[in-house]
Amino acid sequence: METLYKSVRADWEAARERGEWSLAIKAVRELTRMYELQARLVLEAREGRAADVGTHPLFQEFLAMLVTELRDHPEVVARVKALVRRKLDS
């Protein structure tokens, strides 16, 4: 997750430096969305409202977002999916 944050942050900084404000705003929106989603998942897990975070709709949305962002890198998608499965099974 931290790698994805860094990637989006780098995109934002590059777009800002080039004066591509619409692209910079999109990157900020994506960062905001990621932080909101992470906060919701943590809150749901802490409050026990999501007994199995892996089947929670917000987690599924987050995973789908990751896969979409990494669609040009199928080997990374496969590794992320495998890692998530291992974490959820442990």
Image: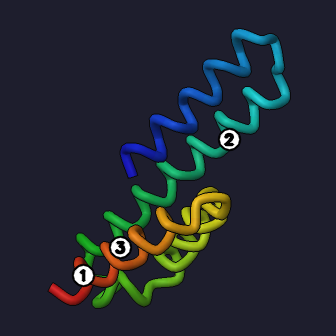
Q: Which residue is tagged 1? A: 86
14 relative to 86, above or below? above
Disc ID at residue 26? none
Residue 81 in the image: x percent, y percent? Answer: 42, 76
The amino acid type of the residue labelled 2 equals Arg
Quarter of the rendering containing residue 3: top left
Vertical relation: 25 (above or below) 54: above
Horizontal arrangement in the rendering, residue 29 relative to residue 77 (left or right): right
Give the x, y percent position of residue 59: 46, 75
Residue drawn at x 40%, y 56% is 39
Instruction: Report helix, strand or loop for mark 3.
Output: helix
Q: CA distance from mark 1 to mark 3?
A: 21 Å
Residue of label 3: 44
Badge 2 is on which residue?
Answer: 29
Judge by depth and name the residue closer to the eye, 50 or 66.
66
**Which badge, 1 or 3, is on the more N-terminal residue?**
3
Question: Mark 3: which amino acid?
Answer: Glu
